[in-house]
Structure formats: C-alpha cells, structure tokens
Amino acid sequence: MKVLLSWLREFAPFDDDVDRLSGELSDLGLAVESVERRGEGLGGIVVARVLELRPHPKADRIQLVDVDAGDGEALQICCGAFNMAVGDLVPLATIGTTMPGGMEIAARTMRGERSNGMLCSAAELGLGDGEAGIMVLDGGVVPGADLREAIGIAPDVLWDLEVNPNRPDAMSVAGVARDLAARLGLPFAIPTPTVAEGGSEVADAASIEIVDADLCGRMLTRVLRDVSLGPTPPAMADRLRALGMRPISPIVDLSNYVMLELGQPNHTYDLARVPDGHLRVRWARDGERLVTLDGVERSLIAADGVIADRDDAAIGLAGVMGGASTEIGEGTTDVLLEMAWWDPMSIARTSRRLGLRSEASMRFERGADHEILALAADRFCQLAQERSAAVAVAPGVVDVVGELPLRPAIRLRTARVARYLGNEMAPDAITALLEPIGFATTPVEDDLEVTIPSFRYDSASETDVIEEVARTYGYGRLPRSVPHPQVSGGLSPHQQGRRLARELLLGLGCTEILPLPFLAPGELAAAGVPADAVVLANPLDANESVLRTALRPGVLKVLAYNASHRRAGLSVFEVGTVFLCDGANPPLPDEPERLAVALGGRDAHDVVRLWRALGAALGVDVSVTNEAHDGLHPGRSGAALVAGAPVGVVGEIDPAVAETFGVDERVAFLEVDLAPLLAARSPRTYAAVSRFPSSDIDLAFVIADDVASDQLQTAIGDAAGDLLVDISLFDVYRGSGVPDGSRSLAFALRLQAHDRTLTDDEVGAVRTRVIDAATATGATLR
C-alpha cells in the first residue's frame, strides 16, 4: 500500500519530519519499504504540444518529433517512444534541466539529427512506472506552462508500506492516517461529505434484492444523473498514479480514488443498461456464463457470487469484477453507484479460482468495513459534483442488509495484558491506547469490555486486542526478557535409570529381547516359577492362555529357539512386566516391572560380576547371598540384594529346567524387580585419580560352600579400609588340596593412596587386617 503525505494530511495535521513519520509507521507494523520525495527536481520541465511526427532517416527505433514549447516555434526532439500523436500535450525537459535522477539535459546529435531537449515518461519524472512510454497530459493545459503548475504537482512524500493480510484497515489512506495520528497523539477525523440532492427519489430508479444473505452482508446504491464529467483533474490523476493506479476515465478514476482513500471498493453501472435499476444478489449456478470487464467470458460455479439484473441475468462477479454488459461508456448519462460488503471467504475462493486478483477483491477478502458504505457513497457523489455542477444526485439511498458478522464485546483482562506484554497497564492507560484506533472500551471492575470496530474484521479475540495494545504502545517500549519455555515431556528418574541399565547391558554385549507375555500353562511350573497365573478368557492362541509370573520362561524359550538354529552362547536381556495374582485385590493382578539377564554358556560368577557392574553404573549398593531357589542350580544360586534387601534371584539355571526347555548349555541367570533397584539410585560421585603408584595383593582363602563369596568379599573390603581402590574375585577352585564341601576363592586387591606412595609396612598392615577379617568368617588362608 502506497500513501502520500499530502493525502494523509487531509485526515490529521502531520508535520514534515519524514524520518520520524517513517519510523513510527514501521513501529506500528506498517513497515516502510521505500520513501520517495516527489515533485522535486522538475524545474525546467514544461508542457509542449506535438506538431509533427516523422521517422528518423538513419534509425528505425528513433523518431523525430516537432513540438511547440510555448513560443509558437517548432522545436525538434529525437525520441525513442512511439505512443504520441499530433496534438498531444507532453512534458519537455528543456536544455540545461537536471532531471530527478541526476541526468543533465543538453543539446545532442543523434545519428546526424539534432535533439533540443527530451520528452519525458512518468518514470523519468518520478511520477509513475512509465510503461506506456511518453507521459501524455490531459487537455486543459497550455504549451509553455511549467509542468508542476500545469498538473498540480507540489512537493510531496510517497511511502510504500508493507501491509500484512491481518490489517484490512491499513488498505486505505484514512486507515494509515488513523494509526499514525493515534501514535503521535494528533486529532483524526474523516470529513463528512456534503451532497446536493435533487430530482426524483432513488427508490424510483433503483432497488436491491439480496437472495443469498450469507454472500452479501449489506448493499447500498445511489443514483447520479446528468453525469458529464470533464477530464480527471491533474492533482487527482497524479495521486492515482502515485498509488499505482493508471487514470482510465472520469467515473472509473472517481471509483478508484474513493477506494484508495476510504478502503471501500465500489462499482458503477450504466443505469440505462440495468433494467429498472434492479440488482439481485445470489450464488451463481454451475455452468453460468459471464463476460467480465476485461472481455473474457467466464464459466461460473455454485461457489461464486454474482450480481444479477431484474431478469436474473448475471451482470457482475461479486466483489471481483463487473460485467461488460453494464459498463460505463462515453454515452453514459446516468450512473448507478453500488457499495457492498461481501463474505471474505467467498471472494477469496472466486478470486483464486479464476486468477482474478483485483484491488477490490484484495480488500474484500481481507474484510472491508460494512459501516462506511454510506459515507463512501456520499464521498463519491461529492467528488462528482465538485467536478461538474450539473450532476444531480437522487435523494436517499437504497440500503439492504443481509447477514453481517457478529461482533460481540470482548472482556479484556488487565492481568492477561500484563502477563502477555510483561508490563503492568492500568485500564485507563489501555483505553488511551485503544480508543484512538477505534476500539471502544467500557470499564468492568478491574477489566475492560472492548467493542471491536467494524473496520477491523481481523480482530475477534482477547489476544487480538492485546496485540493492538502492544502495537500502539510500541514493541520497542516493552520490557525485554529471555523467554523460559515450558519443556514438555522428558524422562522420569525411573525411566532414566531403566534407560541407563539398558545401555549398560548393551555395552556388555547383551541383546535385548521382547518375548510375548503369553505362556502355556505348564511352562511356568517347568521353569520353577509360581504357576498361580492369570488365565485369559479369550487368548490369541489357545495354547498360550496364561500371563507370565516371571520373565524366566520367555528368556529360556528364546535361548532354546536360537539353540535349535545352532546359535549357542547368546547373552540376552529383557525389561518387561509380569502379572502376579493378588488375593487382596482380585481380579486385578499386580504388574511389577522386572529385568532378566541370561548368559548362555557362562557360569554364576559371570552373572554376579554383571550384577555388580549394574549396581556400580546405577550407584546402588548391590550384593549376593547364597540361597536355593526353585528352577536354579541348588548349589549355584542366591538372592540378589539391594542395600541388604532381596530384590530378585541370581545364579545358574537348573540343568533339568534347561533340558526341559531344550537348552543344552549352562545358563547364568539374573532376574530382579526394577522398582526397588532404581529407587535406590544415588548421585554419582567422582574422585580425583591418584598420581601415586598402586600396590597389588593376591590372597586365596578356603571357605565352606555354604558361605557366600559376597560375604567374604565384603569382609575383606571393610578390613582393607580407605586404601582399597579395587577388589575382584579372579579364581574359584574345587579339587585336590581343598576339603570336600569347600572351595578356594582367590581375590585381587589394589591399594593406593591419594597423597603418597604406600610403604611396605602400610601394605603389610592392610594384608594382616584382611587375613584376620577373612578368618573371622570361617575362611583360612590357603
């Protein structure tokens, strides 16, 4: 959208500080894309009349033009444009003139012919795009006249503004002036047009019928008679050109002028071509044909809106383009002026489907102002009567209302304004920001009830109103802060621990498996786990009708399946839910989450080491105690402990159980409840690595089979004290030299201090304490 400073001043008293005005426009959301100072640098450019046109004897793309620059003498100009005719009035830059672009005009010889000046296009004068070649002036001016005086050009400022689709009000000069005046605290007003009415009533010549009220919310017409307007005044034509519209004809120019000024598109009909002046608004019929003003016959569909005549023949495409059958022509004397408010979505659909995006459709699809129709119609009539005193305007208007959008008042909570903008604002301060831009407010307790103006179709919610408060207040004035977004999701401590356990087991070479929780009734007992299971009423497979009470059967079935495919020695783990019958709350089972690990071809010591590694990774105090369990090897099984409390079983699968499931290798096995394991996690602690050398001690003890190796290892560790940095069981021996019912356990101890190198005496003292502690558990040094 382009606006002129002189035009803005017709609504508010703006000053000449162009830089300040540009900054305020951009801050209001109407980003200034360019600023152009017009009417400057046009000294020395005069009006000239074309006397003769003839070809250049040595150049096909240049013609020789003789012009009268006001002295009656023919002055030859070489010109590359061919859009002129003898008698036309054109701008002539005389010799010595400096053009707005900085070029200096001098006498030149072009292919042997002398050129005494330059004929100018609108673009070269900074008055338009110049696509039509040399600027041809309207009649009424005389050769030799200064161009600025002849066409009413005064120094002015033209802004090219970026107007977003959510600002329909800014698609007019008045709308831009309203915003800018509110920001600067200046009085704003749209002048009330004065219209001299006379003759017969408008109802005698025109009528409106809205058949489909959902298409048209309101339509208004006025009738103008004896419309014989002269050429469009130079000042009006210049404003149209500045805002990107080419002057076409007196009536069309008036229509475009009112649209640019007030934002209300309108359409004019030759009244003689509209039977009885009757306009009928309806949806089109599929396949209906209409020849539009551009001379194209278009096929319509039921989603298009049309304006039809008394005989129901379409004479216009609603809100997009008029029909050729009622076009204003040179013989037009009476004009039917129509203003309407159209449903924005219907206009947008039709415009896009037909590829017809006009200035009118662009405004209608954004949401025009249905309350300004009467004022805009009066403005059109006023401008017509200013052009010709003979124009008679029929008294009254025909005004018919269809379905207009509901605009209920909105409750604006000051607390929400403060939360959104980060700035406390009193109701009076908010009112002072909203009312100058047309938003009416009424105090309601500590809040405001806001009525949105009809020209702001885009605003419909409390958030929209808060945006207007921020915009008029100034985004740059709001306090700045770094937003702290609420992070949704994330892992709970239990989920984090479970993920860490999975990663550790994968790192130790185990493969995660996901067996189904459905088992055959006999498989639970065969695995040595509780067989009191939940029975499914409608199982997927009749042979698998119970829910597992432990993970052991499913893990063994996986090992058996792989063994049948000659894949032995697998290390696998599963994290899954088991279903335990709870007599206190039938029929709902308890569903704890468990972790099971099976190491094919490995022994109990391997799985105990894995259990210790898992505890170290999770920061949990884990241990093992000897204990027989059904389904596990009677001499190689125990309880897995967390902080001294049992949480599961550890050891080797009973060979008979393994054989039942078809597994013919040793299987080290661990199954624990995850909840108590992960609940015992403690923050990971770190210690500096000692720079001093370590000392290693290897000790072997003979101890009874019924004493857990963990018990002996714990006693050794406690006796070694703070100097112990690592202890590991590296050998288990049964055989010659070891009594029956006992075994030899060999431990490697690493001692190290953080502040010194250990002496032989210190190492010897630790060795003595360790042996004494082991002896207290019933062990003997081997």
Image (cartoon, grey):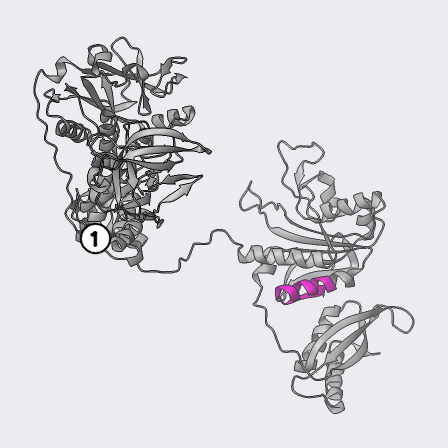
**77 left or right, relative to 632:** left
On the question of residue 454 being in view, the answer is: no
Location of mark 1 (residue): 16
In which quadrant is the C terminus drawn?
A: bottom right
On the question of residue 413 being in view, the answer is: yes
Of residue 404 and residue 246, the one placed in the foreground of this image is: 246
Of residue 89 and residue 623, the one placed in the foreground of this image is: 89
Q: Residue at x 65, y 42 (%)?
A: 533
In which quadrant is the N terminus drawn?
A: top left
In this picture, which residue range is highlighted in magenta? 609-626
Of residue 318 and residue 765, the one placed in the foreground of this image is: 318
Splitting the image into 4 quarters, where does residue 325 fall? Answer: top left
Of residue 181 and residue 782, the one placed in the foreground of this image is: 181
**187 left or right, relative to 760:** left
Q: Secondary structure at mark 1?
A: loop
Kind of residue at badge 1: Asp
Residue 721: x, y in percent? 67, 81
Q: Residue at x 78, y 63 (%)?
A: 605
Query: Relative to 307, does residue 443 appear above or below in the rendering?
Result: below
Residue 263: x, y in percent? 25, 34
Query: Relative to 440, does residue 350 appear above or below in the rendering?
Result: above
Splitting the image into 4 quarters, where does residue 440 fall? Answer: top left
The single residue placed furthest to the top in the displayed view is 311
**650 left or right, relative to 283:** right
